[in-house]
Image (cartoon, rainbow, N blue to C red):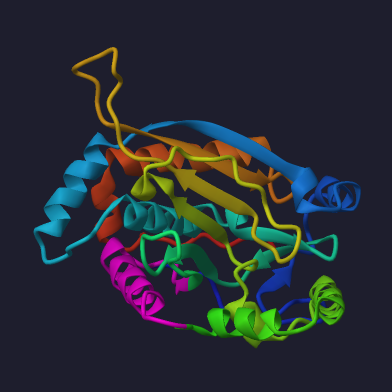
Amino acid sequence: MNNPRKYRRRFGDRPDGRRLRTIDPLFSVAAHIMKRRAGAANYFSGTLNVAEAERYLREKRCENMPGLGLLHFFIAAFVRIVSQKPAINRFVSGRKLYARTEISVNLTVKKELTVQGQETTVKMYFEPTDTIDIVYQKVQKAVEEAKQEGDSNKTDRMARLLNYVPGFILSFVVKVFEFLDYFGLLPRKLIDISPFHGSIFISDLGSIGLPPVYHHLYDFGNISAFLAFGATARNPLRSDSPKQIQFTLTLDDRICDGYYYSGVFKLLHRILKNPEMLDTPPETVAEDIR
């Protein structure tokens, strides 16, 4: 298997990304014109045929993988797409474009499905060679830990600590965080617990009976993609229609162009038609430009 050569960090890089120095000038200028993620967001929506994916997941659940579902599938698919289309894992920070040095996926987890149930965020790190079996293990472990009673991770503890800070001081603290993040000086430990830093935020709204929403991108942090999807359903006008899901995807327009995004969607459809691709590591791992 061919993996990218190891990169040596240079001046101007961040703890979670390396600065792209050979990028098309148009992208460099765009980061100064579209200064915030909210103003640079593209919103996609559509339906995906998940018949083959569901058949595949049923077979995998029989292989001692209880609870394996579309959430695991889409995380594994994203990891595989990043391994072949690394520009989807870029981000803009401080009006500069970076290639993320890791694949990190953020999820919101509700400890109990009640109105009073505490909500938390988990962040999971993946390798571009991870198969769906590895993804399943990492997701299950992270979710089980997150569902423990009380403040189960460092994100919870940080949020509770900040909750005790008076409002005017908290505003100042947030401005300091924004300043440090802008210049790439935010400590690695804070990036690791921040729900606003990561490759993608994924929301399985079908699990709580909601259709997918068009979710905004956070101006703080560096998440460049937000995926939401609903429950599986058939076309009510056709009894023989395959199972489908509705999805919405919010993407940062500044990280790559429409042609590149088109290639990302084509690869996703290929994985949906041939989900067994996720059983083995990719033959090669593509590297982003320098």
Across and down, in percent, residue 221 comes to: 71, 66
Residue 168 location, quadrant:
bottom right
**In the image, residue 12 above or below residue 50:** below
Instruction: Give the quarter of the figure containing the C terminus.
Output: bottom right
Label total for image: 0
Instruction: Give the quarter of the figure containing the N terminus.
Output: bottom left
Judge whether residue 141 is colored magenta. yes
Residue nearest the viewer, comparing 95 with 264 = 95
Residue nearest the viewer, comparing 290 with 91 = 91
> Which residue is found at the position 60% from the left and 52% from the top?
225
Residue most extreme to the top: 237
Across and down, in percent, residue 8 comes to: 67, 82
Residue most extreme to the left: 62
Q: Is residue 8 visible?
A: no
> Which residue is found at the position 17% from the left and 64% from the top?
65
**In the image, residue 261 above or below residue 29:** above
Residue 222 location, quadrant:
bottom right
Judge whether residue 257 is colored magenta. no
Residue most extreme to the front: 116
> Which residue is found at the position 36% from the left and 71% from the top?
143
> Which residue is found at the position 29% from the left and 12% from the top?
237
Q: Is residue 236 visible?
A: yes
Q: On the picture, is 19 further left or further right than 16?
A: right
| Residue stretch rendered in magenta on the structure | 124-150
Across and down, in percent, residue 152 comes to: 44, 83
**In the image, residue 73 above or below residue 241:** below
Q: On the picture, is 245 further left or further right than 66?
A: right
Across and down, in percent, residue 199 comes to: 57, 62
